[in-house]
Amino acid sequence: MTEIRDPVHGYVKLDRLASELSETPQMQRLRWIKQLGLASLVYPGANHTRFEHSLGTYHLACVLADHLGLKEEERLKVGAAAFLHDVGHGPLSHATEAALAHYLRRNHESAIDILRRGELREVLDRHGLTPAEIQSLISGNGLGQIVSGEIDVDRMDYLLRDAHYTGVAYGVIDHPRLLQKMLLYQGQLVVEAGGIQAATSLLISRLLMHPAVYYHHVCRISECMIAAGIQRMIEEGASASEIKAMDDIQLFTALESAGGLAEEMGLRIRSRRLFKRAVYVGLESLEQSLLRAGERALSLEIAEAAGVDAGHLLVDCPPLPDTPEGSFPALVAGEIKALRDVSPLVAILERAHKATWRFGVYVPEEMREEVSKAARRCLSIKRSTVQHTFSDMDNDYL
């Protein structure tokens, strides 16, 4: 049994399988991938890594597995899946995922190719486990609900950990109560009536952490910049799969070696010379048809109207927020009901998530005035609906 001191959960005890997995190059790589990507540009303490989060997720999975009374073999598999659930992440975590998924057609939860080869495969083979069954659990099948579901140990750990390292207290949740009030009912992971408040608090935390941390405008701007750099590298011949296999340090080295726009984006981020918001509005300011137009098409249209280089005009139209946690099953008086049906707050939270969504157009500061005017014309945005003035937008730490 290996013990590792974790700042969030205290001592995390690794069984033999997890200990061997932790020493593989594939897992050690996660030490060099920041959990929150570029969020340290806003919150200087946000330098924690995917490796730490993997440890925390493993710990909570083991706690829940023990509470549920899983057999030893089941506990072993669930623990391994929890520990390995992020091994497929690319550099800077979610900051590069969308850019790479466009070329690779898969996200970080698809780790089967990594599990099938190298040291990870050797460890799994020694313990009688197959890559396919671990991938199935990571995908949320069967007991994988513990690792990847509407309410799971992954979410619990990242909310707690991200709150700890950013100093944003919104992510603090009553996870011991939530874990103690979860059970398996007819093969389904559910929360008992006594855990509904704890489950609701998790949803509230996630809602508040979204605009404050995960979708903070500086994070969105820097992620769009890094995506533009990666896209330019791939257009000029770089391999998307090789980029995904990099860690954070290797990515910035590759960007700066690529020259041109890719190098510029890398250097701008490293020196925090970020693009500025020319437009930053909510759903109520946009025609719904614009959401289907595509970022590239909108970028070209606005750039042409403003008379600027489209390579330096970034359109950010993130996916509309969803709250799948609202459908998490709650066991109330012997009957299964969706969490939203037993907690009035959950239904309100699902609507509130849309109010946090923002559409952005980001450019170098010297282009902002012209691009803002052109974008408002192209997108039919009324000045009265723009929520920030340029002076407001200049404070990148708010």
Image (spheres, rainbow, N blue to C red):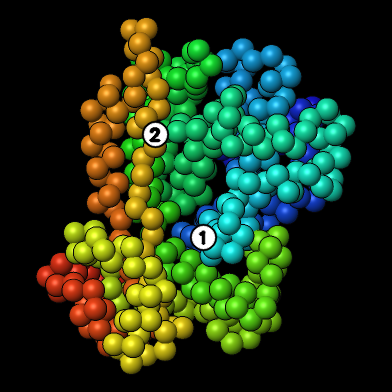
Instruction: Indicate whether 218 appears above or below 83.
Output: below
Numbered badge on residue 325: 2
Q: Secondary structure at mark 2?
A: helix
- Of labels 2 and 1, earlier in sequence is 1
Q: Are marks 2 and 1 in contact (CB under 8 Å)?
A: no
Q: At which x and y percent is residue 368?
A: 31, 83
Residue situated furthest top in the rendering: 334
From the viewer's side, name the closer residue of 113 and 33: 113
> Residue 133 lies in what quarter of the image?
top right
Taking the spot 84% from the left edge, 45% from the top edge, the residue there is 119
From the viewer's side, name the closer residue of 228 and 61: 228
From the viewer's side, name the closer residue of 13 and 329: 329
73 horizontally vs 353: left or right: right
Tag 1: residue type? Ala
Quadrant that contains the C terminus: bottom left
> Residue 322 lies in what quarter of the image?
top left
Camera sees residue 55: no
Taking the spot 23% from the left edge, 37% from the top edge, the residue there is 348
Q: Secondary structure at mark 1?
A: helix
Instruction: Indicate whether 259 appears above or below 61.
Output: below
Q: At which x and y percent is residue 10?
A: 62, 33
Taking the spot 38% from the left edge, 19% from the top edge, the residue there is 330
Which residue is labeled 1 in the image? 98
Q: At which x and y percent is residue 93?
A: 57, 56
Instruction: Indicate whether 133 appears above or below 246.
Output: above
